[in-house]
Image (cartoon, rainbow, N blue to C red):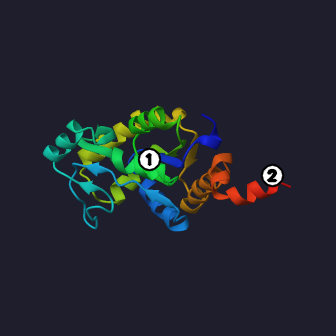
Amino acid sequence: MTNSMKKGIIYLIAAPSGAGKSSLVKALLQKNPDIDLSISYTTRAMRSGEENGREYNFVSIEQFEIMKSNNEFIEYAKVHGNYYGTSRIWLEKELQQNKQILLEIDWQGASQIKRIFAAITNVIYVFILPPSMQELKNRLISRAQDSEDVINLRIKGAKEEIMHVTDADYIIINEDFNTALDNLLGITQIANLISGIQFEKNKQLIAGLSSI
């Protein structure tokens, strides 16, 4: 299927914990309100300041298992002892409406989504990296959300995740936040110039120009 026939855009944003993915995504969505954020389901505990349905749809392990058995997830994974999953129904409905969708996701989920949807939609996979492992550890410590054992587990997991960075279409080093945000915004701007997206947005203009 050519780009002119594909519907919508899926942005897959992956990063090791502490790389600044969530902050960058939040800032991006403020600058580009045309992008819809996929709210994943998770079994992890809600953190201070979070709201159900905003950062995640928080469910019990039992609820997650029922949803999984009902084939309600397009992808799911267990990360740091907690389950995360993406709604199949929501994603397919958004694509039918030619929407731009953003998923905060791990490398495993990104690989699954790309394999499933690359033939029918524009899938753009972005991996965000910290400037160093020491800086990653400093950020995990400064946010004061995890114990030392959990931080060490996240560092170990980060090294494993980074091994898969070459699967991404774009890599952003989040050393300076504003520069990283400009990079991410630039990727979304370029994506909107894909022929199929431009044709959908400018059907009348293109039809008029081609009839001259």
Q: Residue 154: x, y in percent?
A: 33, 43
The reply to whether residue 19 is in sight is no
Q: Mark number for residue 134? A: 1
Q: Residue 90: x, y in percent?
A: 37, 51
Q: Residue 55: x, y in percent?
A: 33, 59
Q: Mark number for residue 88? A: none
Q: Nearer the viewer, mark 2 or mark 1?
A: 2
The three-letter amino acid code for the residue at tag 1 is: Gln
Q: Residue at x 22, y 43 (%)?
A: 67
Q: Residue at x 58, y 39 (%)?
A: 169
Q: Mark number for residue 210? A: 2
**Residue farthest to the front?**
211
Q: 89 above or below 27?
A: above
- Local secondary structure at mark 2: helix
The quadrant of the picture occupied by the C terminus is bottom right
Q: 162 above or below 52?
A: above
Give neighbour class at mark 1: few <14, some 14-19, many 20+ (Cα, 10 Å). Answer: few
The quadrant of the picture occupied by the N terminus is top right
Q: Residue at x 25, y 65 (%)?
A: 48
**Residue farthest to the right?**
212
